Image (spheres, rainbow, N blue to C red):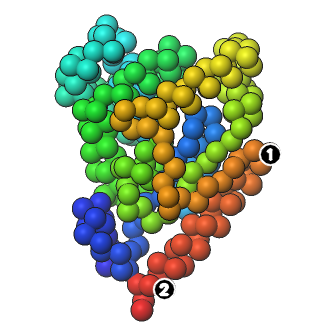
Amino acid sequence: MRVTAESQRELGNDGAIDAMIITIDGPAAAGKSTAARLLAARLGFRYLDTGAMYRAAALAAIREGIDWKDPAQLESLADRIRLEWQGERLLLDGEDVTDAIRSPDVTEVTRFVADSPKLREKMAELQREIGSTCNLVTEGRDQGSLVFPHAECKFFLSADPHERAKRRVADYAAQGKAMTWNEVLQAILDRDRADASRPVGALQCPPDAVVISTDGLTVDEVVAKLEAVVRERQAGLSQAGSD
Ligand code: DC
C-alpha cells in the first residue's frame, strides 16, 4: 500500500508505508540546506527548501513596497502570490527568483514576513501538498513540529553560533559579498532570538527528532549520519509492513 497524503498519515495509517517524509529542522546556518539536498540525492527523494518559500514571499513584499510589519497587508500578499517549484528552481508568479531571494535585504525582511499566521498557513498547505505526492526531504524550522507531525523520520541539526557565522561568511564570500564575521555572528544571534520567540512558527525541536550537532563534522559526515538513521527507519518500516 502506498500512503501518499498527509491526511492519511494523520489517520494513523502507519502500517506498510513506502512513501516517506523526512524533516530536517534547525537554526540558521546549521548546515541544513546542504545536508538535506545531499541526503535527498542519495535517497532519490525530492528535496524541499521551505526557507526559500518564505524568502520569495519577502521578495514579493519588497517589490510591492508593502509594509511587512502590517499583518493585513501580509495576509493579502499570501492570497495573491503564486509559488511553484521547477526542480530546485523557485518561481514567484512565473519568474525564477532562486538567486534573487538570497540577498541580505531579503534575508532581513523574511523573518517579519514569516510571522504572518495566514502566510504560514498557506506555505504549510503548499508544503503538505508537495509531501503528498512523493518521498520528501524537507528542511526548515517547523517541518517536523507543525507541518509534518507524522513524518517517518525527523532530524534537528544544531551548531555553535560561532561555527555557523563562519559558514555564513564563506557562503556570502562565494556570492561575492564581503561581510565580517562579527556582523554575521550578530545577525545570527539576533535571528536565533527572533526565531525562538516567534508567536507563530517558532523554531522548535520536535520531541521525537534525532538531534545532530554538526560542529566539527564535514558535510559528508553529517549526511552519512542522517542516511544511517533513515536506512534504519526504512528497514523498520518495511519490516512492520510485512508483518
Ligand atoms: O533557512 P533560511 O535562512 O532560508 O530561512 C529564511 C527565513 O525563513 C528565516 O527567517 C526563517 C524563516 N523560515 C520559517 O519561518 N519557516 C520555515 N519553515 C523556514 C524558514
Asked if disc 1 is less than 8 Å from ligand 1, the answer is no
Residue 188 in view: yes
**Residue 50 placement (x, y as % from top left):** 43, 39
Q: Residue at x 42, y 92 (%)?
A: 243
Three-letter residue code for mark 1: Gly
Determine the CA span between mark 1 and mark 2: 35 Å
Secondary-structure class at tag 1: loop
Residue 31 location, quadrant:
top right
Toward the viewer: 149 or 44?
149
In primary-sequence order, the first of circles 1 and 2 is: 1
Toward the viewer: 29 or 187?
187
**Residue 239 placement (x, y as % from top left):** 48, 85
Task: Establish if 34 lies above or below 174.
Answer: below
Residue lying furthest top in this view?
A: 65
Task: Establish if 85 lies above or below 157.
Answer: above
For disc 1, the neighbor class at 10 Å (few under 14, some 14 to 19, many from 20) is few
Q: Residue at x 65, y 19 (%)?
A: 186
Q: Nearer the viewer, mark 1 or mark 2?
A: 1
The residue singled out by tag 2 in the image is 239
Asked if disc 2 is less than 8 Å from ligand 1, the answer is no
Residue 29 location, quadrant:
top right
The residue singled out by tag 1 in the image is 216
